Amino acid sequence: MDSSGTRRQNTRRKLFEAAVTLIAEQGFSSTTVDEIAERAGVAKGTVYYNFASKTVLFEELLRHGIELLTDSLRAAADETAERGGSRVDALDAMIRAGLDFITRYPSLTQLYVAELWRTNRAWQSTLTQVRQKAIAVIESVLTEAVTEGELSTELDIPLTASALFGMVLVAALDWQSFQPERSIDEVHSALSRLLQGRVSGAGR
């Protein structure tokens, strides 16, 4: 990538970080383009140069964030498979990857959870699409686990995938908000036991 491309990528990253923090703090409607530009340390015109509007910026922000999470989940599953681990091991690794991601991007996670239920937003379709990409990664591992006999054929794969995804998001936010003294290892261990008891316990 040439220097101009690198500069633009860095500028967009600053805008993403500024926008997600401000919107998580005070809401989308209350956040202005001026505030985003000031927080990012750029001119207001730079925001519009990179994004046609605040709505477009926010839509791309959500897309970018959930795609990062999806990549993390996929990498965790692939690395487990390469080590010869089971599909349930892969699901456990994905839980840890999700917790790691949320620890790195807490504001983005708060924003995603808040926006998930607001069906009147212009970006709802985009949010639904990128969420499904993340869920699909989990579904694929669950499907393989059922096919290989690790899990019961009676398992409701779409609902279980959604439940695991939601469990990690909500548990992580609750941990950071109300039990911050706990380590990520403690939280992962607790969720891992839930996985082993509720999902893998339904196996052969």
Image (cartoon, rainbow, N blue to C red):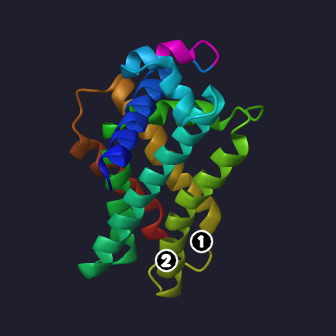
Query: As shown in the figure, which amino acid type bears the numbered disc 2?
Result: Leu
Q: Which mark is residue 122?
A: none
Q: Tell me the distance, in whole angstroms, between the alpha carbons under discs 1 and 2.
A: 7 Å
- Counting from the top left corner in percent of width and height, residue 88 is at 38, 71
Which one is nearer the viewer's eye here, 46 or 40?
Answer: 46
Disc 2 crowd rating (10 Å Cα; few below 14, some 14-19, many 20+) is many
Provide the residue span drawn in magenta. 29-35
Q: Give coordinates of residue 15: x percent, y percent.
A: 44, 30
- Asked if residue 133 shows in the view, the reply is yes
Label 2: state its secondary structure: loop
104, above or below 155, in the image? above
Name the element at disc 1: loop
Q: Tell me if label 1 and label 2 are in contact, CB under 8 Å.
A: yes
Task: Name the residue that disc number 2 marks.
Answer: 151
Q: Residue furthest right?
A: 120
- The residue shown at (49%, 77%) is 151
Q: Position of residue 172 (x, y in %)?
A: 39, 38
Query: Residue 31 lies in magenta, yes or no?
Result: yes
Q: Is residue 129 left or right of residue 77?
A: right
Judge left or right: residue 117 versus residue 92.
Answer: right
**For mark 1, what is the residue?**
155
Determine whether 187 is above or below 48 in the image: below
What residue is rendered at 47% in x and 28% in y?
20
